[in-house]
C-alpha cells in the first residue's frame, strides 16, 4: 500500500488527526511523543532503519517519554553494502533500482523488523544532498516504509526538492513519524490511508 500524504482539509476525526499531524510536522519532538504514545496504546514497539537520516529519527524518538519501553534502536545503513549486510537488502535489487526507491525502503523496513524484537519498523532512504546520489536520484527524493509484524508494509514517496541537508532530513523524519502514527492509530485499516 502507498501512503501518499496528509491533507489539512479532510473532515471528521480521522482527517483531523491527519491534519494535526501535518501541522505539527515542524515539531519533531512532539511527533515522536505522539508516536510513542500511540505505540504504547497498542502495546507496540519500534525500530528504525535509516540511510539519509543516519540515525537521527531514532535519536529524536529516544528523547521522548516512553522511549525506554517502546524503542528498540536503529539500523544506520548509509551505504548499499551495509543495507545488504545489516538488513538483507538484495544486492541485485540495489544494483538494478538504486538505493532510493519503494522496493529498497520496503526491504529495509522488512529487514529491520525480522532482525529486531520490534513490532513496527520505519525506514528512510533518500538523497539529502548537497548533490544527487551515485544513481542520479535528485536531491530531496525520499522513500519511507513502515512495516508491521503480521501486517502490510506501507510505502511513502516524497520529493521535497533541495531544502538543504537538514531541511530534507527534518521533512523526511516528520513524514516518517506522521506515517508511523497513522499506521499505529488505524491499526491496519487500509480504507483509512490518506491520499494527496
Image (spheres, helix red, strand yellow):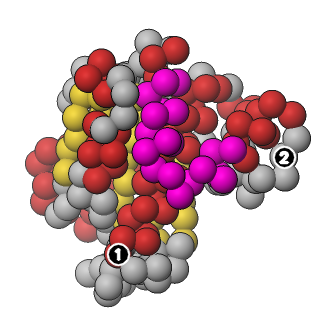
Q: Residues within 10 Å of mark 2 (few under 14, many from 20)?
A: some
Q: Is residue 29 magenta?
A: yes
Question: Is residue 146 in view from this perspective?
Answer: no
Q: Could you tell me residue 93's position as x and y percent?
A: 30, 58
Report the residue at 45% width, 50% height from top. Answer: 28
Q: Nearer the viewer, residue 135 or 129?
A: 129
Q: Which residue is mark 2?
A: 10
Q: Which residue is mark 1?
A: 165
- The part of the chain drawn in magenta is 20-38
Q: Could you tell me residue 124's position as x and y percent?
A: 37, 54
Horizontal side, residue 179 vs residue 168: left or right: right
SS for dot 1 = helix
Q: Main secondary structure of the magenta part?
A: helix
SS for dot 2 = loop
Residue 148 figure quarter: top left
When the figure is inspected, residue 65 is found, relative to residue 145, above or below; the finding is above
Q: Could you tell me residue 189's position as x and y percent?
A: 68, 26
Report the residue at 11% width, 48% height from top. Answer: 85
Amino acid at each position: 500500500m502507498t501512503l501518499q500524504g496528509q491533507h489539512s482539509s479532510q473532515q471528521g476525526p480521522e482527517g483531523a488527526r491527519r491534519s494535526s499531524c501535518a501541522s505539527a510536522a515542524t515539531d519533531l519532538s512532539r511527533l515522536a511523543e505522539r508516536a510513542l504514545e500511540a505505540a504504547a496504546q497498542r502495546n507496540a514497539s519500534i525500530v528504525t532503519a535509516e540511510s539519509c537520516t543516519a540515525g537521527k529519527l531514532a535519536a529524536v524518538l529516544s528523547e521522548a517519554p516512553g522511549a525506554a519501553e517502546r524503542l528498540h534502536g536503529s539500523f544506520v545503513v548509509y551505504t548499499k553494502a551495509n543495507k545488504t549486510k545489516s538488513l538483507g537488502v538484495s544486492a541485485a535489487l540495489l544494483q538494478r533500482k538504486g538505493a532510493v526507491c519503494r522496493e529498497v525502503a520496503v526491504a529495509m523496513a522488512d529487514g529491520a523488523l525480522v532482525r529486531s524484537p520490534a513490532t513496527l519498523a520505519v525506514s528512510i532512504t533518500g538523497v539529502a544532498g548537497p548533490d544527487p546520489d551515485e544513481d542520479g536520484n535528485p536531491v530531496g527524493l525520499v522513500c519511507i516504509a513502515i512495516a508491521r509484524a503480521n501486517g502490510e508494509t506501507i510505502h511513502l514517496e516524497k520529493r521535497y526538492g533541495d531544502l538543504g541537508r537538514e531541511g530534507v532530513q527534518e521533512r523526511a523524519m516528520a513524514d516518517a513519524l506522521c506515517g508511523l502514527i497513522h499506521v499505529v492509530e488505524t491499526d491496519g485499516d487500509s480504507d483509512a490511508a490518506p491520499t494527496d
